[in-house]
Amino acid sequence: MSDAIKHECGIAMVRLLKPLQYYKDKYGTAFYGLNKMYLLMEKQHNRGQDGAGLASIKFNVAPGTRYISRVRSNADQPIQDIFAQINGRLNKLNETFPNKIDDVAWQNNNAPYLGNLFLGHVRYGTFGKNSIESVHPFLRQSNWMHKSLLVAGNFNMTNSKRLFNDLVELGQHPKEMTDTVTVMEKIGHFTDDEVAKLYIKIKNEGVNKKDASPLIEERINIKKILKRSAKNWDGGYAMAGLLGHGDAFVLRDPAGIRPAYYYQDEEVVVVASERPVIQTVFNVAIDTIKEIERGHALIIKRNGKISMDKIREQLPQKSCSFERIYFSRGSDAAIYKERKNLGKFVFPQILKKIDNDIKNTVFSFIPNTAETSFFGMREAAEDFLNNQKAAIILEGKRSLSVEKVKEILSERPRIEKLAIKDAKLRTFIADDNSRDDLVAHLYDVTYGIVKPTDNLVIIDDSIVRGTTLKQSIIKILDRLNPKKIIVVSSAPQIRYPDCYGIDMAKLGDFIAFRAAIELLKDTNQYHIVKEVYNNCKSQKHLEDTKIRNEVTAIYKPFTDTQISDKIAEMLRTSAINADVEIIYQSVENLHKACPNHLGDWYFTGDYPTPGGNRVVNNAFINFYEGNNARAY
């Protein structure tokens, strides 16, 4: 993607179902779970490189023995950093006690990060915070194992203020107003309440305090705790949690916005944000990996019982389509096919722009994530040419010579790799003019291929802000001296902010929004801007369920093509010699390509939860008032 955007986050969980000695005997190490966690996290580093954290819980250790270990990092390479810290401690222990390397029971009591239950997290700091305190997993510690809580998640709540106020009404004093803190304290509060009620009940059965703890751990109702905790949550989430005694859960939002997959066999239960990660790390068949159902929690009890429990009423499924377009690893079989289809389905628009002139058109892509959609575009171009060849041959019949037939069959789409990103280049210059010049050289190009009579078609995953296109890509492609530059987005126009974990929170950042505003000015309809502002303000006092998305009115007077043409005009500076045109995928074809991931609110304004409408209206208020702030 030329305009890089960040998103929250990636989770990994491993629950070993056998004693540690089993893994030592079968796999040669009691650290089997820890090793798998490293692979699960490293293979999800695409989901977050600002911070990483890991926690482990030991079973069957005596009081006085540390049973929870946690390490977090916000270093430049956080995953490598946390495992370097872990390995450093373990290597030191092995050097001190070399005769204990094969003693699993001793290691369980003395080695940190050896455990039966693991939770890992990778993150991008989308809320402008990248301090170590913002790195998951979060820990709420207690001397009672069943009250100790670890939480990590891929989530964003639209109603953090309400959740914060709910805690205040419960008599709490939260240390900060973030959705992570409020979510953890919500779960913690209802865990405490559940434990207190269980203790009274067990005490009335005549059980003493010491013997009550294992009974509480056995009877504690995770489903009930999550139902009470998540009652008012509005957002997208895959929320993972561990209780100190060994219960674990992963809860997914009712619309299935954020992804979560799991696999289980007789040895292990594993959860990750992406399916191919599990498939690769555990070498299992794709059909053995399941999605956690929306509105449900995968609950793993300390005794090994595994269940999928309904926590919230399901909403219509609106799984995030951006996961398929860009975020998730393209090694997933379904995602690979979907991305190819995105390239195929946008090709008819390309043909119109080049007047069916394949012969004088060069096709390429913005590296590196657009490559798969480029393959689909290439196949569509080949299919078009093959149909042309077949028609010419059939029309010519026996009048065609062998040489002519060979000439017809030899025509192929002109497929080239023209843009090469300079990964080592950094924008280290302080003043703006010098920085713009540096940004213009973020990509190198291949000379000697494009002719002055050629169209140059280049495909990207998405065009969000248009900044890199304007400052770098179009400038550098124009040096090749093509007749026309056509930039193709495999995704539709991004028109609305996200509030479920993607770092797209401000309307003014979106080139499609800015283009619509310019069109309103051009067509003497700018009064609509004031009307939308007033309508947004008038709904501030309403409950989320009664709020409408007023920002759709900004786009209503114009077709998709009008907005795309305006974007092209805005991105083409006076220094550019070639004509510039922009093509966006249609929403209809997006749904056709990704039929099981219909979450499209950033394209259509159709938010899957009521809180989304409040966020988009607040974002417009911020834009109108010149307030450079997030809307949630």
Image (tube, rainbow, N blue to C red):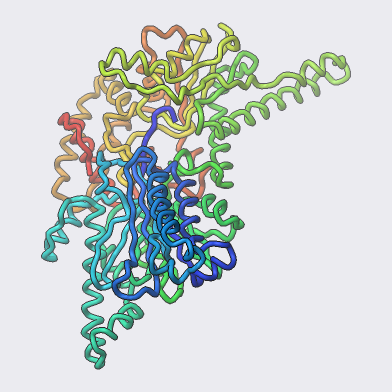
Q: Position of residue 565 (x, y in %)?
A: 41, 20
Q: Residue at x 51, y 71 (%)?
A: 18
Q: Which residue is more in the foreground, 309 or 400?
A: 309
Is 205 located above or below residue 91 in the figure? below
Q: Position of residue 149 (x, y in %)?
A: 29, 64
Image point (30%, 49%), residue name:
135
24 vs 359: above or below: below
Looking at the image, residue 400 sits to the left or right of residue 45; the answer is right
Viewport quadrant of the C terminus: top left
Residue 41, above or below 252: above
Query: Residue shown at 46%/18% (left/top)?
Result: 581
Q: Is residue 323 visible?
A: yes
Image quadrant where residue 80 sits: top left
Viewport quadrant of the N terminus: top left
Q: Is residue 200 left or right of residue 316?
A: left
Percent across and percent down for residue 576 are 42, 9
Q: Quadrant of residue 525?
A: top left
Residue sitting nearer the eye, 96 or 106? 96
Name the residue: 40% across, 71% down: 59
Residue 423 location (% of width, % of height):
45, 26
Above/below status of 486 relative to 148: above
